[in-house]
Image (cartoon, grey):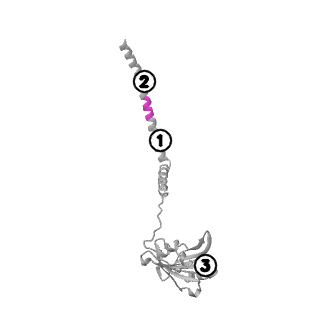
Amino acid sequence: MPQNQKQTANQQSAPQSSHGHGRTVAVVVAAAIVVVIALVTAFLVPGWALRKNADSTTASVEGQQSQTTQTADPTPTISASALPGDATELLKAMPDTVLDFARTAAAASTTWQTASPVEEYTLTYSTGNTANDVTVIAAQWSDKDSAKKQYDALVGTLTGKELASGNVKVSGSNTGAYVTREDASDANKAVSVWQNDTVVFQATGAKQAVQDLTRKFPL
């Protein structure tokens, strides 16, 4: 009888195995049908596959663009020269360094003497490469109107291509204006003139050097 019971068990398990196999085949067939429908849809609906791919590419590009690299401003490789012991407040206000430029000379001058400034100085800013030296003239008047008159006179002599212009602001308030132009006699050089309240500045030298120094000059 144990043998008969075993046979009965085998006979009962056979239909179950056959039924389970049928379910597996049905699942595989259904999955295959879904894949076929997806492929057909991709080609029947214009641009569907392309849009999906484009969306993925756009997200990747946007992610790459969001990663920006910030570089620090260059610093001088040479030391700034000391100011004379009797330097005035205006001369003391002149920066020792600007970007990779260092002040290498500073002395009283009379370039704009006919405009009657209270004081005037000529300074040299250098990176160590004399070809990129920038000469800065700084002069102060007793009132803003006189300084504006000198600024207008200097700007009126500039005839080269304009490189930059705008307002000079201190704590959000306009205190003057600036303009940078190519040197009319040499396109590799530039002249920048700006007014800050009662003080007028003029920077001359190699074009890129003048633009860089003017952009970061603190006065």
- What is the span of residues highlighted in magenta in the rendered image? 22-28
Quadrant position of the N terminus in the picture: top left
Q: Main secondary structure of the magenta part?
A: helix
Q: In this view, does 187 lie above or below 54?
A: below
Residue that mark 1 sits on = 37
Quadrant position of the C terminus in the picture: bottom right
Three-letter amino acid code of the residue under disc 1 = Ile
Outermost residue, top side: 1
Helix, strand or loop under label 1: helix
Front: mark 2 or 1: 2
Residue 182 in sight from this viewpoint: no
Q: Residue at position x 63%, y 70% from top?
A: 173
Residue that mark 2 sits on = 16
* Quarter where residue 132 is shown: bottom left
Q: In this view, does 21 lie above or below 163?
A: above
The foreground one among 192 and 114 is: 114
Q: Which of marks 3 and 2 is nearer the N terminus?
A: 2
Residue that mark 3 sits on = 198
Q: In this view, does 72 lie above or below 112?
A: above
C-alpha gap between disc 3 and disc 2: 102 Å
Circle 3: is it few (<14), some (14-19), or many (20+) Cα within 10 Å?
Answer: some
Helix, strand or loop under label 3: loop
Where residue 154 sits in the image (x, y, percent)? Answer: 56, 82
Residue 23 included in the magenta stretch of the image: yes
